[in-house]
Every structure is written in C-alpha cells, then in structure tokens.
Amino acid sequence: MPELNGWTNFYVIVGSAAGALIGLQFVVMTLIANLPIAQASAQAGDAFSTPTVAHFAVVLLLSAAASAPWGEIAIMPVLWGVVGVSGIVYVVQVARRMRSQTVYQAVFEDWLFHVLLPLLSYSTLAASACLSFAQPRTALFLVAAAALLLLFTGIHNAWDIIRYHVFTTMQEKRDMGRKE
C-alpha cells in the first residue's frame, strides 16, 4: 500500500506512546485509589479521567490500523470517518458531563483541553475521511495531526488530573491537620 509508505515509524512511535500512557493512567489511578476522595468524584472522573484514556485508546487504534497490512487503503477512510463522527458525539457527551458534575468548577483551560481540542481532532479525522479520495496525501497528514493533537491533549489532561488530585488531597490533609 504505497500511500502509507513512510508512515510506519510515525505510527509505531505514536501508538507505543498512547499504549504506554494508557498503562500509566491505570497505574496512577491504582496509586491514588486509596486517597480520601469525595463521593461525587465519580462524576468528575466520567467528565475528566475517562475521556483522557478514551483519547489515548483512539490514538492507539489509529496507529494499529495504519500499521496493519491492509490490501488497500480504502478501509482506512471508513475507519477515520466512523472514529471521527463517534468522537464528536463522545466529546459532546463529555461536555454535558463536565457541565453537570458538581465536584469541580471547570475553567477555560478545562473546556479547551477536554472539549475544544478533542472536538477539533475528531472533526479533522472525519474531514480527512471525506478528503482521502481526492487528496490522500493531505488526508494522511490530517490524520497524523489529529492523532498527535489527541495524544498531546491527553498528556496535558492526564498531568492536570494527577496534579489536581495530589494537590487537592494535600490541601485537604493540611486543612484537617489544622482543625485537630
């Protein structure tokens, strides 16, 4: 499949990074599982943590699909379109969850990294499916850009989530120590 020649290293690197980051998310969640967290934190997890793992999984899926020995590239635009449209629907659901959760008041940075940038990524992915038949080279670069944007957005979000949990828990412990 000549269209994907030269992309192997890119997708091996990006897919490996996404897979490793999914694993790290599980490790971190296990480590912070014993921290005292408010009952309503499950709402925040649905709004913030779960989408991060989902975006990493999409990057892993795109990388695996691009590395598979397809007989022709025609299946790829279908995958990009399905994943792109599904991602758009998912991001709308994430926005609803962010709005309805009561644990944390989302600020502009949260809306940017949890809604706007993923929405841009999934829209780019869906657009690349449409563009792929007329301009396959451009479409491949758009898919790569969407995958990288999801990967870097996920890295930001994972760090932000961990930082929030660690510093919030530390502050709560300090406040409890002052009360005693």
Image (cartoon, rainbow, N blue to C red):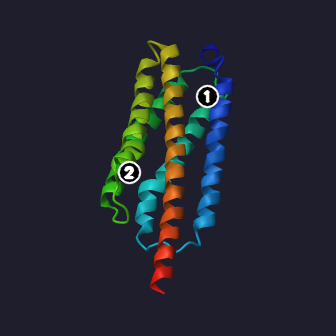
Residue 147: percent from the left, percent from the top?
Answer: 53, 33
Residue 150: percent from the left, percent from the top?
Answer: 50, 38
Q: Which residue is drawn at the image coordinates 64% and 40% (left, top)? A: 17
Q: Which mark is residue 94?
A: 2
Q: Quadrant of the N terminus?
A: top right
| Amino acid under disc 1 | Ala
Q: Which residue is drawn at the image coordinates 50% and 55% (left, top)? A: 161
Dot 1 or dot 2: first in sequence order is 1
Q: Which residue is drawn at the image coordinates 47% and 37% (left, top)? A: 83
Q: Under tag 1, what secondary structure? A: helix
Q: Residues within 10 Å of mark 2 (few under 14, many from 20)?
A: some
Q: Under tag 2, what secondary structure? A: helix
Residue 86: percent from the left, percent from the top?
Answer: 42, 41
| Amino acid under disc 2 | Val
Residue depth check, mark 1 versus mark 2: number of the one nearer the observer: 2
Q: Residues within 10 Å of mark 1 (few under 14, many from 20)?
A: many
Q: Which residue is drawn at the image coordinates 54% and 57% (left, top)? A: 162
Depth order, front residue of 60/40:
40
Residue identifier under label 1: 66
